[in-house]
Amino acid sequence: AFKKKVEKAKLRIASPAKQRVKAGKMAKQKVIDKYYPNYKELGLAQRVKVDQLIQQKYGGMIAKLTMKLGKVVKAKEKEKVKKAREGMKGA
């Protein structure tokens, strides 16, 4: 049942709210990559602390990046749906 749900989700473009969430995650990841390159090696408690610090220090930057990355996410969503539909036709 879950696999069917995932398949159907791939055929639809995500709602604007979900797209904003995805853009927010991308923006946060860009900040992490730039300022905390060793983030992946940190322990769980340290990552939580870094997340809080990022939100305090770079919250505004993340908000601006989220707006800019909204277009990128929208384009990726369209591409995702296009590929999924082509896959369905090919099968």
Image: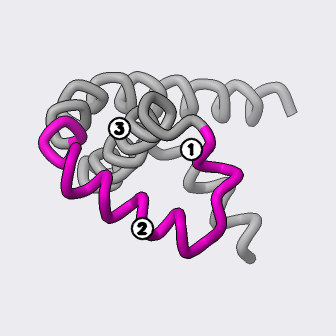
Residue located at (82% from left, 26% from top): 90
Which colour scheme appears in the figure? one colour
* Magenta segment boundaries in residue numbering: 38-62
Find residue 22 and report its horizontal and vertical position in percent: 40, 47
Left of 70 or right of it: where is 44? right
Find residue 70 and report its horizontal and vertical position in percent: 27, 32
Q: Which residue is mark 3?
A: 27
Q: Earlier in the sequence, mark 3 or mark 2?
A: 3
Residue type at numbered disc 2 = Lys
Q: Earlier in the sequence, mark 1 or mark 3?
A: 1
Residue type at numbered disc 3 = Ala
Residue type at numbered disc 1 = Leu
Q: Earlier in the sequence, mark 2 or mark 1?
A: 1
* SS assignment at label 2: helix
Residue located at (25% from left, 56% from top): 55
From the viewer's side, name the closer residue of 85 and 60. 60
Quarter of the image with the C terminus in it: top right
* SS assignment at label 1: loop
Q: Which mark lies nearer to you, 2 or 1?
A: 2
From the viewer's side, name the closer residue of 35 and 85. 35
Q: Which residue is mark 2?
A: 49
Q: Residues within 10 Å of mark 1 (few under 14, many from 20)?
A: some
From the viewer's side, name the closer residue of 70 and 82. 70
Quarter of the image with the N terminus in it: bottom right
Residue located at (74% from left, 36% from top): 88
* SS assignment at label 3: helix
Distance of mark 1 from mark 3, alpha carbons?
25 Å
Q: Which mark lies nearer to you, 3 or 2?
A: 2
Verify whether residue 51 appears in magenta: yes
Q: Which residue is mark 1?
A: 11
Left of 44 or right of it: where is 36? left
- Relative vertical location of residue 46 with respect to residue 68 in this rendering, above or below: below
